[in-house]
Amino acid sequence: MRTLLLLGSVFIVASCQGPNQTAEEVERDDIKTLAVTGVGEVEVMPDQFVLSGAVIKKASTAKQAMNELADVVNAIQAVAENIEQLNDNEFNFASVNTTGVKDPACLLFNQQADRTNNTLRESEKRITKKVCNDISQQASISFNFVGGPPDLAGNALSSFSEAGAIRLTLDGYKIKNIEDIELQAGEKAIANAREKADRLASAGGAKIIGVVDLNSYKPTYNQNTAKAPSINTTGAGESAEIVDGGDPVEVTDMNLKVGKQTISAAVRLEFIYE
């Protein structure tokens, strides 16, 4: 935001100061100042959507599980290439994690043994827990996907699910040139602050002649929390349906089109008046 602060300061100083006076030439103790907060807003459509998901495969050996995992990852990347009109296509995969899968019946027995042992007296014989062996190996990986335009999010959710991904979630939307949009909002906030200062000074029979400083700048848009539907797929390869607090419906039948996002900024300026 350094660019905004510098441009904002130049804009304000140029618009406020007279031809023969600058803020630096005035002793701080000799001036009268007026602090004003200005707010500016810009509405813009996001350019991209953000998805997250995972791939999990189980097999008799870790090598086999990783091979099956790789097949699904390749399939997901392939379907992304084939989604029509998808302009942006960026995957970010985490490291592959492998782990042994214990016998669930053995794990359940040990849980029940713990509960029972906790109710026994010291003199009573306790149940001996079993050693649970691995019955298979599991390989897993999580990923993020950034695509665009944003109204293709449903197509991506459906395609990735059918290709074998699970835990798919539409995380939100992104704006590519967010810094430029924030700058526009900041400039509007500066103009709004000057307008307020002029009105306040005029009401008291004074006028604005300069500015001391641009004290603060605060954007109020967060790309990670842009509005998005709460959506999760039902399961990898099982269907192209999603569950959103009710009966499953086709992903592409839902309205996943994002509306305009509001980028706002607030600046606090201290003006000189006489």
Image: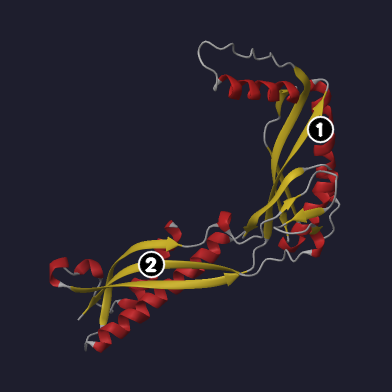
Q: Quadrant of the C terminus?
A: bottom left
- Could you say where residue 227 lies in the image, as x and y percent from the top left? 61, 62
In terms of image quadrants, where is residue 76? Answer: top right
Q: Position of residue 269 (x, y in %)?
A: 32, 69
Mark 2 or 1, nearer chain start = 1
Q: Residues within 10 Å of mark 2 (few under 14, many from 20)?
A: many
Say the numbered circle drawn on residue 267: 2
Q: Is 26 positioned to the left or the right of 252 in the image?
A: left
- Quarter of the image where one finds residue 245: bottom right
Q: Kindly identify the amino acid type of the residue bearing the numbered disc 1.
A: Ala
Q: Residue at x 74, y 58 (%)?
A: 153
Give how far across and how far down residue 273 sits, in percent: 23, 79
Q: Residue furthest left?
A: 30
Helix, strand or loop under label 1? helix
Residue hosting label 1: 70
For label 1, the crowd category at 10 Å Cα-Cα, with few meaning under 14, some 14 to 19 and many 20 or more, is: some
Q: Residue at x 84, y 31 (%)?
A: 68
Q: Amino acid type of disc 2?
A: Val
Viewer can see residue 86: no
Nearer to me, 207 or 131: 131
